[in-house]
């Protein structure tokens, strides 16, 4: 099978690695320059999307911020999965909120803001504190404001007005602030035959708006809630592939924060911790192959490597530690790779995280601070 991926970042790279043993060959469309590249080496394989589409058996995506005309061309080929509707919703918070309402899953109360008057209506409807997010282009907590005090309305409006004016079709989505205890996410796959396989929930820690630590957890009650919401969303979209749902855990009730119509950073732990990793399951789903088991095989946590391009070699000698680099050029705060830490027996994961915390720089890996001895 030949799969063309829209986007050529680390997610396409890891899909490529996972596809190789199944003889699934990947090429990637670099949205920034229109080149078709090898997702592992970034070697240019050709140019021209039309050729690449003609040569592919299946087309999929590794991120949601894809120009709609490109999605439409892919859609017309009849080869695109999950669905262009899901990708568009993942890239536009207005569509995303409508989709969540339509699927009947709990999400934060919201209002769409296009003008100063809309802002007043939103304050009335949503209440403060509120979280304000750009409808288009947001990621890693970028393009967000918090309104806690009415005295800040004009200042925040000035910034939001600039944002709205900065690009076509931009708007702001105002959301009620959810006073959650923790954040969790569910990654799962839906096959072409409608079969669904979800992974155990992951508990996620963000540092300055960016995911820093993700740990697979066992919580039957939350898992059942999450799985039900996953099924509602996936079925309402007739989704095929891996889909991630991010949740707030509010007193044991899950509230969906957002969806990601693709493999997700909070599912990277599955490379070492699950029977079949999320990348392989995405490819299995879109290639119409049976889904692989999503069962946890050992307790695993994932730590993002942000803005660093070297790690002490001694990490490679530590039991249960696996490094995954993305081959990217170093830039402050950039997702450069991740470390999966696995345990072979109960209680061992904390000890291994503590051992890592001893070796790694505390400022570069703030999420590990709580494990330091
Ligand atoms: P990413 O793409 O990295 O997931 P993002 O830019 O799409 O991030 P969100 O996930 O919507 O943004 O928000 C980033 C973080 O801000 C959330 O993980 C959460 O910690 C906080 N947050 C977002 N919305 C709310 C809310 N309504 N109430 C409370 N906290 C929120
Ligand atoms: Mg998020």
Image: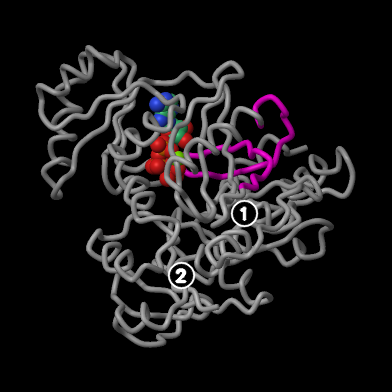
- Of 176 and 288, nearer the camera is 288
Which residues lie in the magenta part? 196-223
Residue 217 is inside the magenta segment:
yes
Residue at the location (47% across, 30% down)? 256
Q: How is the image coloured?
A: one colour
Most extreme residue toward the right is 345
Residue at the location (53% across, 72% down)? 327
Residue at the location (46% across, 71% down)? 58
Q: Quadrant of the C terminus?
A: top right
Residue 244: percent from left, percent from top: 52, 45
Count of numbered labels shown in the rendering: 2
Please, is residue 237 above or below residue 23 in the view?
above
Circle 1 packing at 10 Å, graded few (<14), some (14-19), many (20+), is many
Residue at the location (62% across, 43% down)? 214
| Side (left or right) of 39 relative to 48 | right
Residue 301: percent from left, percent from top: 70, 46
Residue 348 is inside the magenta segment:
no
Please, is residue 28 above or below residue 205 in the view?
below
Q: Which quadrant of the frame does ligand 1 lie within?
A: top left
Residue 75: percent from left, percent from top: 32, 64
Residue at image mark 1: 268
Circle 2 packing at 10 Å, graded few (<14), some (14-19), many (20+), is few
| Side (left or right) of 213 relative to 128 | right
| Side (left or right) of 122 relative to 46 | left
Q: CA distance from mark 1 to mark 2?
A: 20 Å
Residue at image mark 2: 329
């Amino acid at each position: 099978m030949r799969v063309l991926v829209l986007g050529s970042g680390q997610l396409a790279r890891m899909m490529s690695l996972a596809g190789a043993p199944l003889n699934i060959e990947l090429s990637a469309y670099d949205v920034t320059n229109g080149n078709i590249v090898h997702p592992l080496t970034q070697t240019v394989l050709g140019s021209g999307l039309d050729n690449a589409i003609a040569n592919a058996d299946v087309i999929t995506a590794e991120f949601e911020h894809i120009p709609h005309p490109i999605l439409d061309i892919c859609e017309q080929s009849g080869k695109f999965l999950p669905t262009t509707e899901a990708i568009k919703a993942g890239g536009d918070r207005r569509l995303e909120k409508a989709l969540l309402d339509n699927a009947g899953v709990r999400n934060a109360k919201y209002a769409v803001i296009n003008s100063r008057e809309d802002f007043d209506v939103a304050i009335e409807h949503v209440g403060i504190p509120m979280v304000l997010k750009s409808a288009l282009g947001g990621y890693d907590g970028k393009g967000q404001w918090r309104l806690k005090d009415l005295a800040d309305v004009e200042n925040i409006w000035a910034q939001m007005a600039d944002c709205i004016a900065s690009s076509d079709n931009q708007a702001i989505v105002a959301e009620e602030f959810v006073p959650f205890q923790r954040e969790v996410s569910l990654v799962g796959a839906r096959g072409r035959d409608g079969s669904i396989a979800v992974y155990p929930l992951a508990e996620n820690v963000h540092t300055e708006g960016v995911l820093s630590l993700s740990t697979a957890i066992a919580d039957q009650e939350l898992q059942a809630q999450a799985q039900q919401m996953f099924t509602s969303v996936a079925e309402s979209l007739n989704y095929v592939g891996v889909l991630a749902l991010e949740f707030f855990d509010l007193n044991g009730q899950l509230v969906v924060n957002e969806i990601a119509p693709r493999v997700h950073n909070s599912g990277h732990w599955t490379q070492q911790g699950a029977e079949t990793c999320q990348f392989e399951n995405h490819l299995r789903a879109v290639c119409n192959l049976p889904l692989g088991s999503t069962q946890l095989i050992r307790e695993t946590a994932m730590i993002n490597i942000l803005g660093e391009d070297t790690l002490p070699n001694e990490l490679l000698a530590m039991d249960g530690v696996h490094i995954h680099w993305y081959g990217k050029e170093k830039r402050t705060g950039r997702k450069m790779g991740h470390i999966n830490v696995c345990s072979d027996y109960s209680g061992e994961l904390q000890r291994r995280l503590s051992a890592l915390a001893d070796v790694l720089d505390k400022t570069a890996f703030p999420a590990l601070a709580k494990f330091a001895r």
